[in-house]
Every structure is written in structure tokens, then in C-alpha cells.
């Protein structure tokens, strides 16, 4: 009886180990094998000035640079000029918006959520085919306007851009 309990426990441990190993994370790209380089032209800013209450000057350049930096950090794809790239990521900024999410006693906003949304197309440069297309892809952050955790909208925008860049690179590389 004691021997069968030990065997049962060993079996459960072995099955658990196999299951965990099968669910492991990998940092290898899940792109087609012929995609090893990528171009990231400067994103277009499609936000109409009349449709926004806030605006971050140079947003299109900052987002593009953040994505390039994140791709370089990731290391799965080499960022090159368009004429040498296997694929091109084309993006358009469609939304830069902040929402009030927490108020103080006097209806003053204490905390905001900042969103940056883009439309994306990843295209195979050799075949001309679209690998994938995504609309309304978002990066975001929350920030306080007062108190010990206060930050500026500019710092929050940088955080939202970093979140966006990470999400985009994850989408390119991992395709989840």
C-alpha cells in the first residue's frame, strides 16, 4: 500500500513537471523564417487637432524611436532601412487621450489614465503580402496629478509609449 502511494505521488510529480515544461516561455520569434530584418518608418499622426484636448508634440517620432529601441533590445529582428528589410511595420497614431479615473473631494481630478492607440500593418517586403494588420492597438498608463506619486503628463506619455512599444514588439515577435 505504501509503495503504491509513493508511485502515485511520483507519477503526479512527473506529469506536473512535463506539463510545466510544455508551457515554458521562449524568446524565439514566431515569424516566417525569411523575416530576419525589419524597417520601421516614422508613424503617421492621424489625430485631428480638433478631436483632441491634449497633444504631445513629436509623438510620431517618439513612438517610432521607442519601437525601434524595443526591437533592438529584444534582438529577434534587426532594424534596417526599408530597402534592405525583409518586413516593414507601418503605423498610424489614431488616438491620444486621457480619462479621469479618480477624483478628490472638490471634483478635482487626482488620477488619469492615458491611452495611445495606433493602427498597424506588418508587411512582407519580398512578397508584398500583409503578414498581419491590427487596428486600435493600445499602450496605456495611469498617473497621479498630486500627492507623493504625482507625475507630469509628459512622463505619463513616455510610460504609455513604452507600454505601446512593448506590446507592439510582443505582437510582432510572439504573435499572441
Image (cartoon, rainbow, N blue to C red):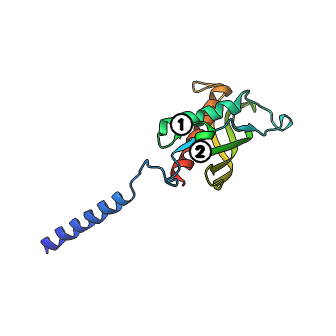
Q: The residue tagged with tag 2: helix, strand or loop? A: helix
In this figure, which residue is indicated by the disc labeled 2?
168
- The crowding category of the residue bearing disc 2, from other C-alpha atoms within 10 Å (few below 14, some 14 to 19, many at least 20), is many
Residue reaching furthest to the right: 50
Pick the front one: 128 or 5:
128
Query: To which quarter of the image does residue 15 belong?
Result: bottom left
- Identify the disc placed on residue 98: none
Is residue 124 something that shows in the picture?
yes
How many marks are shown on the rendered structure?
A: 2
x%, y% of residue 142?
62, 36
Q: Which residue is mark 1?
A: 70
Q: Residue at x 35, y 62 (%)?
A: 19
Measured as percent of width and height from the top left, residue 59 is found at: 70, 31
Residue 160 found in image quarter: top right
Residue at point 47% right, 43% down? 76
Q: Are marks 1 and 2 in contact (CB under 8 Å)?
A: yes
Q: Quadrant of the C terminus?
A: bottom right
Between the residue at mark 1 and the residue at mark 2, the CA separation in whole angstroms equals 9 Å
Q: Residue at x 48, y 39 (%)?
A: 74
- Pointer 1: residues within 10 angstroms few (<14), some, or many (20+)? some
Residue 144 position within the rendered picture, expressed as x and y whole percent measured from the top left = 64, 30
Amino acid at each position: 500500500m505504501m509503495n503504491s502511494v509513493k508511485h502515485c505521488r511520483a507519477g503526479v510529480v512527473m506529469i506536473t513537471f512535463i506539463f510545466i515544461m510544455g508551457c515554458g516561455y521562449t524568446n524565439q520569434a514566431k515569424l516566417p523564417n525569411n523575416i530576419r530584418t525589419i524597417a520601421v518608418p516614422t508613424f503617421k499622426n492621424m489625430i485631428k487637432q480638433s478631436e483632441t484636448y491634449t497633444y504631445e508634440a513629436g509623438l510620431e517620432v517618439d513612438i517610432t524611436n521607442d519601437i525601434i529601441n524595443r526591437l533592438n533590445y529584444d534582438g529577434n529582428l534587426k532594424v534596417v532601412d526599408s530597402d534592405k528589410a525583409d518586413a516593414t511595420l507601418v503605423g498610424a497614431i489614431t488616438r491620444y487621450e486621457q480619462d479621469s479615473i479618480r477624483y478628490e473631494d472638490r471634483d478635482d481630478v487626482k488620477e488619469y489614465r492615458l491611452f495611445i492607440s495606433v493602427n498597424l500593418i506588418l508587411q512582407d517586403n519580398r512578397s508584398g503580402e500583409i503578414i498581419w494588420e491590427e487596428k486600435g492597438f493600445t499602450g496605456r498608463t495611469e498617473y497621479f496629478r498630486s500627492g507623493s506619486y504625482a507625475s507630469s503628463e509628459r512622463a505619463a506619455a513616455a510610460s504609455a509609449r513604452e507600454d505601446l512599444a512593448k506590446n507592439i514588439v510582443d505582437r510582432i515577435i510572439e504573435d499572441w
